[in-house]
Image: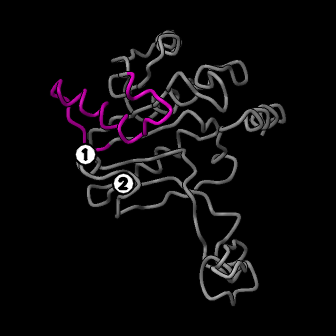
Amino acid sequence: MKTLVIIPARGGSKGIPRKNIKPLNGKPLIYYTIDCARAICSDEDICVSTDDTEIISVVEQYGLKVPFVRPAELASDTAGTYEVLLHALDFYEKQGRHYNAVVLLQNTSPFRKAEQVKEALGMYNDYVDMVVSVKECAANPYYCVFEENAEGYLHVCKGDGNIFRRQDAPKVYEYNGAIYIMNAETLKTTHMHKMQKRVKYVMDDLSSFDLDTMWDWQMAEAIIAQGK
C-alpha cells in the first residue's frame, strides 16, 4: 500500500500563536509529528503543507524537504483541512505519484505515539473509507448531556431518558484529532466528515490530548514536567 502522510501547518494559528514551531520541551511542536511520520514511511512520502516561510525553514532544518508553498486561499481562517488534503494529493498526482491512502497527522497531538499510528494503519484496508482515532466521550449523550426542547425544558439528547447509571449507557466516542487514515480515491469525491465506512481506533486520554489554547499548552508542559 502506497501511503502519503500530510501534515498541515498553517502559519496564522490564533489560539496558540505560532504553535507549529513553538518549542514544547525544547523541541518545535511540528517535530513531534514529523517523528511519527518518519516511523511509518520515508521522507519522500511526507508532505508538510504550509504557507509560512519560517515553518518551511524550521522543517527543512530537521532534514525534511517541504515540496511546495500552500496557496494563500488555502491558508485563511476559513480554509478547510479537506481542501488542503485535496491540494496536496493533486500536487503529487500531477507528478505521476499515486497513493492508495492518505494519513492526516495534525500537529496538535504531541503525545500521540508512532506505535499507535502503526496500529491504526494495520486496521486499514481498501474496503473502508477511513480509520479514525477516537477517545471515549466523558459526557455521554445517553446519560448526562441535555438539550432544551420547544417548551424550554431540558431533556437527555439520546435515548428515552431511562438510563440512570453511566455504566448502563452505550459507549460513545469522539474524534480526538490525532490520526486519520483515508482511502485516497474516496477522499477525491467525499468530504472526510461524510465518509460512511469509518472504523475507530481507540486511544487513551493522554495520547488524545489536543492543543487548542494556551491553557492546553501549559497543561502539556506540566504533563511533561511530571514525567508522564
What percent of the width, then of the height, locates residue 106?
Answer: 51, 36
What percent of the width, then of the height, locates residue 17?
Answer: 65, 24
Q: 150 or 181: nearer the eye?
A: 150
What percent of the width, then of the height, locates residue 18?
Answer: 62, 21
Q: 11 or 207: nearer the eye?
A: 11
**Which residue is disc 1 drawn over?**
188
Q: Is residue 98 magenta?
A: yes
**Helix, strand or loop for disc 1:** helix
Region rendered in magenta: 72-101
Disc 1 crowd, CA 10 A, few/some/many (<14, 14-19, 20+):
some
**Which residue is disc 2 drawn over?**
124
Q: Is residue 149 above or below residue 114?
A: below
Contact check, label 2 and label 1, Cβ < 8 Å: no
**Helix, strand or loop for disc 2:** loop
Q: Is residue 222 left or right of residue 156?
A: right
What residue lies at 70% left-to-right and 63% top-to-bottom? 138
